[in-house]
Image (spheres, grey):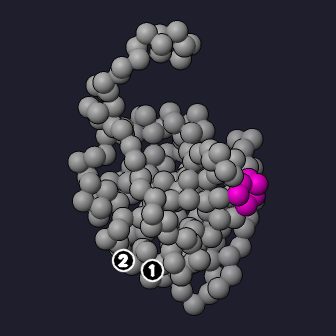
């Protein structure tokens, strides 16, 4: 199956669209835009579906307004996938942002990859990953990384099939919610001298 790239300029910003061709259903990828009607709502709906699949719907706190402001500020990029001929309904997405590695420099992080249930097994997940890989390469970055839940055997098999390395000995660590808001600082005096 071939993936074709088409470049256009919309509002002074380069916009890339990808289409699939072949025996399987055709999908179209395009970059989400903060000012485009429906894009933020589509991303939020897909994020909620993914969170529900991951049994974490209660953890989604981000509002559409905050997401719009973050996309406008360039804090992330998001590819939206639609079925060819039906640009209204997003059926998948890949949301990425940069992060920094002291080993590799600037890297791309794939925060969310999601394909609606009815579109799985048709090559769309592969298309979205390929688009993320191509975008990472074009940005001159040396790493594309993401996380996968340890119980999501289908996703793990899919990623291994792509040649992705699963880092079994590394754990994800984070502070959030009350643990972040009420962190027990022990060095307030030293921190007060910094210009943070």
Q: Which mark is residue 145?
A: none
Q: CA distance from mark 1 to mark 2?
A: 6 Å
Q: Nearer the viewer, residue 131 or 99?
A: 99
Look at 67% across and 50% down and name the residue there: 103
**Quadrant of the rendered image containing residue 31:** bottom right
Q: How many marks?
A: 2
The picture places residue 102, in percent across and down from the top left corner, at: 65, 45
The picture places residue 145, in percent across and down from the top left corner, at: 56, 59
> In the displayed structure, would residue 191 be above or below residue 23?
above
What secondary structure is found at the residue carrying circle 2? helix
Q: Nearer the viewer, residue 145 or 131?
A: 145
The picture places residue 154, in percent across and down from the top left corner, at: 39, 78
What secondary structure is found at the residue carrying circle 1? helix
SS assignment for the magenta stretch, majority: loop
Look at 38% across and 54% down and name the residue there: 47
**Quadrant of the rendered image containing residue 24:** bottom right
Mark 2: few, some, or many residues within 10 Å (few <14, many ≥20)?
Answer: few
Q: Verify CB contact (< 8 Å) between mark 1 and mark 2.
A: yes
Q: Which residue is mark 1?
A: 157
Q: Which residue is mark 2?
A: 153
Look at 45% across and 46% down and name the residue there: 40
Mark 1: few, some, or many residues within 10 Å (few <14, many ≥20)?
Answer: few
> Which portion, as a residue range, is magenta?
137-142
The quadrant of the picture occupied by the N terminus is bottom right
């Amino acid at each position: 199956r071939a993936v074709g790239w088409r470049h256009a300029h919309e509002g002074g910003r380069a916009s890339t669209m990808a289409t699939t061709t072949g025996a399987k259903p055709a999908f179209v990828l395009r970059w989400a835009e903060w000012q485009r009607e429906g894009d933020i709502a589509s991303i939020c709906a897909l994020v909620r579906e993914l969170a529900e699949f991951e049994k974490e719907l209660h953890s989604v706190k981000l509002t559409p307004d905050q997401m719009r402001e973050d996309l406008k500020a360039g804090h992330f990029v998001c590819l939206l996938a639609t079925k060819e001929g039906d640009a209204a309904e997003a059926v998948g997405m890949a949301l990425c942002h940069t992060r920094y590695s002291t080993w590799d420099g600037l890297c791309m992080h794939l925060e969310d990859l999601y394909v609606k249930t009815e579109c799985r097994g048709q090559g769309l997940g592969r298309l979205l990953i390929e688009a993320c890989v191509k975008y990472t390469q074009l940005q001159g970055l040396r790493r594309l990384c993401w996380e996968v839940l340890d119980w999501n055997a289908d996703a793990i098999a899919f990623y291994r099939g792509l040649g992705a390395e699963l880092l079994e000995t590394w754990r994800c660590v984070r502070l959030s919610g009350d643990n972040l808001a009420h962190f027990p600082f022990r060095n307030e005096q030293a921190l007060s001298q910094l210009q943070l």
